[in-house]
Amino acid sequence: MTATTPLYDTYMRAPLRFERGEGVWLIAEDGSRYLDFAAGVAVNSLGHAHPHLVEALKAQAEKVWHLSNLYEVPGQESLARRLTAVTFADRVFFTNSGAEALECAIKTARRYHYARGNPEKFHVITFEGAFHGRTIATIAAGGQQKYIEGFGPKAPGFYQVPFGDIAAVKDAITDETAAILIEPIQGEGGIRPVTKEFMQELRALCDEFGLLLILDEVQSGVGRTGKLFAYEWAGIRPDIMAVAKGIGGGFPLGACLATEEAAASMVAGTHGSTYGGNPLAMAVGNAVLDVILADGFLEQVRDVALVFRQGLASLKDRFPDVIEDIRGDGLMLGIKAKGPSADLLKAIRAEKLLAVPAGETGRRLRPPLTVTAAEAREGLARIERAAEAVRSSSGTAAA
Ligand SMILES: *Cc1c(COP(=O)(O)O)cnc(C)c1O
């Protein structure tokens, strides 16, 4: 049999081919311009071809591309120093992806208890609807059958409890529990923010039972919610945190952050990565932080997010037959379609606006953090025209 493509069929790809990007715009091979509010699923945090990132990558490319972790890598130390200065963390391990950052986080938590003479404490409590990546361990952590099915026995030690149910978390804690792992905003699970109170209760439970609190801020981190990390909204501090996506601005980069205490048993030889902390990735990561940590940047994100949020809320009011709900925080937003999500997706794409599918009924909006209020309004105008198109094609009259 001849395949139509030599690639694995693991993705349902849209028939769009982009050649280059400029800020919030992607330009297709045929020259048409799309407003990119998908941003590589929250990866292109500073949009496309940001001059400061391009410059940093080029400058590093002319020096050295790769050094193994057998040597000191100055870019790693500077990026780690900057990350620990602005977070709860004291230690950083660099990875190439979000799933690898979570693998490191899970290993760190298990090793912590092992080193204290409690090797039986390796269980991790996670939440229904979670997404933590596609490795054997992280599909078990996410617990979603559609990702686990067919890949052998589910990796042991992961227990899902209903989202937002603190009593269920408490019930699930046993003598074998090592940690609680949660996304401050579920990205895949229909964009469900965790309340501030819930985060505080999780922190209190972890303190009470000697568990480590692991946050998955792969999507919610690095400015996406208008704070550098989403946990800051809840006024708590985790013990371990996985970061990726936005931190690399499009270059493969992830990081596992931990407190001194949590990371203490991750000694020489316990973990490693060939490419983790690669000089090219470090140069870009440092350049991303230059922009995001600059005075006023996160304030601007919060201002634009407000414009966006209000615009979407007013569209929901005007198109209740098309838009059922608006969800999310900051520039991590979701639109829940009233009818078949495919109709809204098609209409949005016809308006040359890119969004990310989420579940059966949702569209996720993840514009670059550099999006201006004017660009946000342009996006809202396109969503409005898409909603009108869905309404007129479904024949429902306006109220
Ligand atoms: C994308 C994502 C991951 C996985 O990251 P990869 O880089 O694809 O391995 C994990 N957790 C969350 C919350 C994500 O959004």
Image (tube, rainbow, N blue to C red):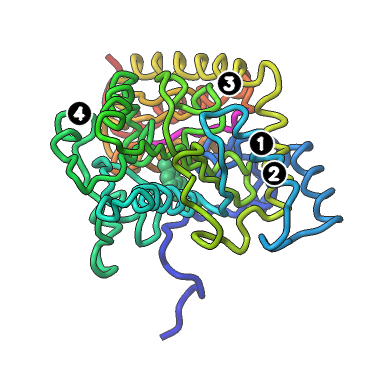
**Which quadrant is the C terminus positioned in?**
top left
Q: How many marks?
A: 4
- Residue 350 seen in the figure: no
State the extent of the magenta-drawn residues as a range.
363-369
Kindly report the distance in space between the C-alpha atoms of the residues bearing marks 4 and 3: 31 Å
The residue at which mark 3 appears reads as 301
The residue at which mark 1 appears reads as 81
Tag 1–tag 4 contact (CB < 8 Å): no
Residue 126 relative to residue 111: left or right = left
Residue 396 relative to residue 38: left or right = left
Q: Label 3's element?
A: helix
The residue at which mark 2 appears reads as 77
Disc 2 crowd, CA 10 A, few/some/many (<14, 14-19, 20+) = some
x, y percentage for residue 130? 31, 43
Instruction: Please report the residue visible at 35 percent of the width from the left and 58 percent of the height from the top.
Output: 137
Kindly report the distance in space between the C-alpha atoms of the residues bearing marks 1 and 3: 24 Å
Residue 102 relative to residue 72: left or right = left
Q: Label 1's element?
A: helix
The residue at which mark 4 appears reads as 166
**Which quadrant is the N terminus positioned in?**
bottom left
Kindly report the distance in space between the C-alpha atoms of the residues bearing marks 2 and 4: 38 Å
- Residue 248 seen in the figure: yes
The numbered mark, 2 or 4, whose residue comes first in the sequence reads 2
Residue 50: which quarter of the image?
A: top right
